[in-house]
Image (spheres, helix red, strand yellow):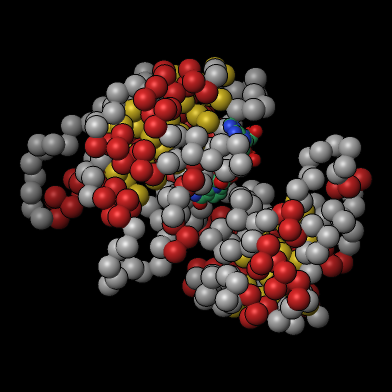
Amino acid sequence: MKNAAMFDTKPYDRESFEKYNGKDGIFIKYFDTRLTEDTAGLAENSDTVIAFVNDVLNAAVIDKLYGCGVKLIALRCAGFNNVDVKAAFGKIHVVRVPAYSPYAVAEHAMALLLTSVRRTHKAYNRIKDFNFSLNGLTGFDLYGKTVGVVGTGKIGKIFINICNGFGMKVIAYDLYPDKTLNAEYVSLEKLFESSDIISLHCPLTSDNYHMINRENIARMKSGVVLINTSRGSLIDAEALLDGIKSKKIGAACLDVYEEESDIFFEDKSGHIMQDDVLARLLTMPNVLLTSHQAFLTREALDNIAATTIGNIKAFFDSDIPENEICYRCGRIEECRKERKEKCF
Ligand code: NAI
């Protein structure tokens, strides 16, 4: 019997995981609270912790979980920038769901872009009020525009295909270009300088923190539309705000925000917003923000639950940790996973 403590559980998570609960010897205990140093003790007697994007998995939390007897952190997401993988190495193994529906995220990025440029969110509210005026709703054609895609992995590729379908010119930047794509790879500087629309689809790493900063915003075309469905800290939010105030940035479509962890996924409607940058961004007519919901489709939730449970079973029942990650992963000479072994 294996016990799993699942943190930051929302009703839609429970619905997708519940069908596996108690089957194949895996018992899930759900906690609404996020995983932090204060709540890590709830994992006492659990073999596994099931965690999400805004759960805190720093060295202190990892040590507490290790003390509780946790052997596996099963991330129910793709990104693992919230895990101190070095601190976990040798103590707790980490697995993730590398892909659950790249379509969900790519389609959400396009939904944000279309909503922003065609003002459908404003039209919807206006017409509910029997205001049928078109003043202020002028958009622009996507056809013929240049879109710059940063990161051409699973999600970026699908977004590029969608943009190709709209007749847009696609330029792209990735550390590992994929020459089969219908996109022209350019330097990051050229991408910033030439794009009418920029969409971020790369992971957050120590190298690209605040990739969108004052210096790079200054390089961009006036009126550029920025889309970020990846991770908030790719953008310096204060620089973004100034870019919007100065009208350099024409619109921002954000599904993520650098200080989202204490705010997103929760109903804060009765609270005083303490984050001044977020509050100011939300006053802007050209900022469209969703609360990290790009992944939220039925297909993605089903895949997340199935892969997470599969990862837990594979970890405890076999030596083939297909979705394990560690700070050495990918370094060919050190990567045990290449030899179909656990990371340590
Ligand atoms: P992936 O691993 O398939 O592709 C990422 C690509 O980015 C790779 O081609 C990689 O070479 C490239 N890359 C890495 N560092 C880079 C850099 N500094 N500059 C440019 N390119 C770089 O990942 P996938 O599945 O496409 O996901 C991308 C990101 O989307 C995830 O890392 C995650 O942060 C975000 N995401 C957001 C979700 C949401 O609900 N908003 C849901 C799922 C993922």
Residue name at image x 18 percent, y 52 percent: 125
Kindly indicate the quadrant of the structure image that contains residue 145: top left
Taking depth in this image into account, of 329 and 133 the one nearest to the observer is 329
In this rendering, would 248 be left or right of 172?
A: left
Using the image, determine if residue 128 lies above or below residue 209.
below
In the rendered view, would you say 164 is above or below 49? above
> Which residue is painted at 61% across and 41% down in the image?
206
Residue 66 shows up from this direction: yes
Residue 260 located left or right of residue 181: left
Residue 220 position within the rendered picture, expressed as x and y whole percent measured from the top left: 38, 23
Vertical placement of 49 versus 127: above or below? Answer: below
**The N terminus appears in which quarter of the rendering?**
bottom right
Residue 147 picture location, percent across and down:
43, 25
* Residue in the picture at 67% in, 49% down: 98
Residue 168 visible here: no
User: Which residue appears at 57% of the width and 64% of the height?
Assistant: 55
Would residue 275 be found to the left or right of residue 187 on screen?
left
